[in-house]
Image (cartoon, rainbow, N blue to C red):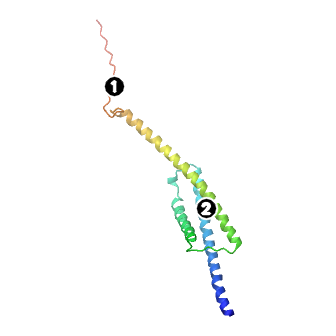
Amino acid sequence: MKATNMKQAEPTRTSAAGGDIRIKSLIALIDVLTTLVAEENAELAKGLPASRLRQVDEKNRLAELFERTVAECAGGSTSLHVRDMILREQLMERILKLRAAMDENLVRLRAAIEASNRRIEAVMQAIREQIAAVSPYGASGRVAAARTVSSGTSRRA
């Protein structure tokens, strides 16, 4: 009877150890993702355009991995049972830090996009003005009337 109880306890211990390893891996993933997002936020704060940020690809890859892990947990295919209270608190702390960094990232990316749109509009307006200044066509799309040029001739009688 004792042998049967030992066999039943072993998978639980193995599962708990496996769960701890998964939690530690998830915490490590969250730490790297939070660091990347913080770096991106710092660069966005300097006014760099979002398209020139070097963290974007890696951030997207890690975010996809994180989302997949969360979806697996929500779908029931993966379980993250955390028996260790300290480990659970670390996970929750990391998730909250990541959420704060991502919230800031969203605000900064929106501001960067708006700034890019303003720059694009300013360039387009300058191009429109240059084209209008040299174009033989008027606003209606027809050839504009020849500009009157005064040529002063004076007749003396």
Q: Does 109 sit above or below residue 142? A: below
Q: Residue at x 55, y 68 (%)?
A: 71
Residue 27: percent from left, percent from top: 63, 68
Check disc 2 and report its element: helix, strand or loop: helix
The residue identified by callout 1 is: 147
Q: Residue at x 54, y 49 (%)?
A: 112
Q: CA distance from mark 2 to mark 1?
A: 63 Å
Mark identifier at residue 34: 2
Residue 29: percent from left, percent from top: 59, 67
Mark 1 is surrounded, within 10 Å at the Cα level, by few (under 14), some (14 to 19) or many (20 or more) other residues, namely few
Quadrant of the snapshot with the N terminus? bottom right
Quadrant of the snapshot with the C terminus? top left
Q: Earlier in the sequence, mark 2 or mark 1?
A: 2
Residue furthest to the top in view is 157
Q: Are marks 2 and 1 in contact (CB under 8 Å)?
A: no
**Residue type highlighted by circle 1:** Arg
Q: In the image, 100: left or right of 138?
A: right
